[in-house]
Amino acid sequence: MFQTLNGFFTLWKFESDATQKVLNQLTDESFSQEVTPQNWTLGRIAWHTVTAIGVIASQTDLSFDSPTQDYPVPTSATYISESYKKASNALCEALKNQWSDEKLKEVQDVFGQNFSNSELLFFMIQHQIHHRGQMTILMRQAGLTVPGIYGPAKEEWAVIGREAPKM
């Protein structure tokens, strides 16, 4: 877990930038992509990724402006992408202004489980990664280009003149 807020900010910057890259690739038309009718659509997962920042943070004493309602799902990819950027920035500003490193040690009930604030921030990052993975699968199914996250994506290997490694 995080010992300092700067530790969180370093990892959050990388992971939120990666999530932003994914959200920036979405189109309004891609939002209806789904695995099955019983599962969330790409648009629903994208919006949930935005709202989860405020929902998870609401379990603490942090106060900042962020959407927290999963429904209705907006129909604009641009709106969702911009909303994510605002929520991510608002979270970081709230942490800088309202918490100290010492605050990371505090433990509280979060959705029925005891979490330190440090653990909660780590969970927030894991949650982003989890849903980003779901989105990239649905993006491929929708015919969108998936950006590289932890290395080049298939399309990026082609640009650098190499074939993607076989996994």
Image (spheres, grey):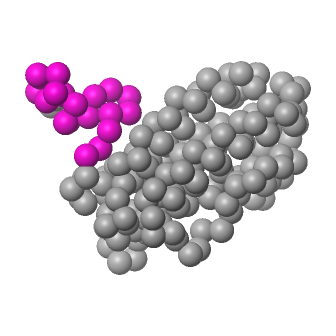
Residue 13 drawn at (x, y percent): 58, 30
Q: How many numbered circles are shown?
A: 0
Which picture quadrant has residue 21?
A: top left
Q: Is residue 16 left or right of residue 38?
A: right
Foreground residue among 139 and 74: 74
Above or below residue 75? Residue 157 is above
Q: Quadrant of the C terminus?
A: top left
Secondary structure character of the magenta stretch overall: loop
Q: Is residue 127 left or right of residue 42?
A: right
Residue 164 drawn at (x, y percent): 16, 29
Image point (63%, 47%), residue name: 86
Above or below residue 116? Residue 7 is above
Image point (41%, 47%), residue name: 24
Residue 74 drawn at (x, y percent): 51, 69
Q: Is residue 44 left or right of residue 124?
A: left
* Residue 54 magenta: no
Can residue 94 be seen from the camera position used here?
yes
Image point (11%, 22%), residue name: 161
Q: Is residue 44 left or right of residue 98?
A: left
Q: Quadrant of the N terminus?
A: top right
Can residue 113 be seen from the camera position used here?
no
Image point (28%, 28%), residue name: 152
Residue 127 drawn at (x, y percent): 56, 47
Which picture quadrant has residue 75?
A: bottom left
Give the extent of the magenta segment: 145-163
Above or below residue 108? Residue 27 is below
Above or below residue 59? Residue 22 is above
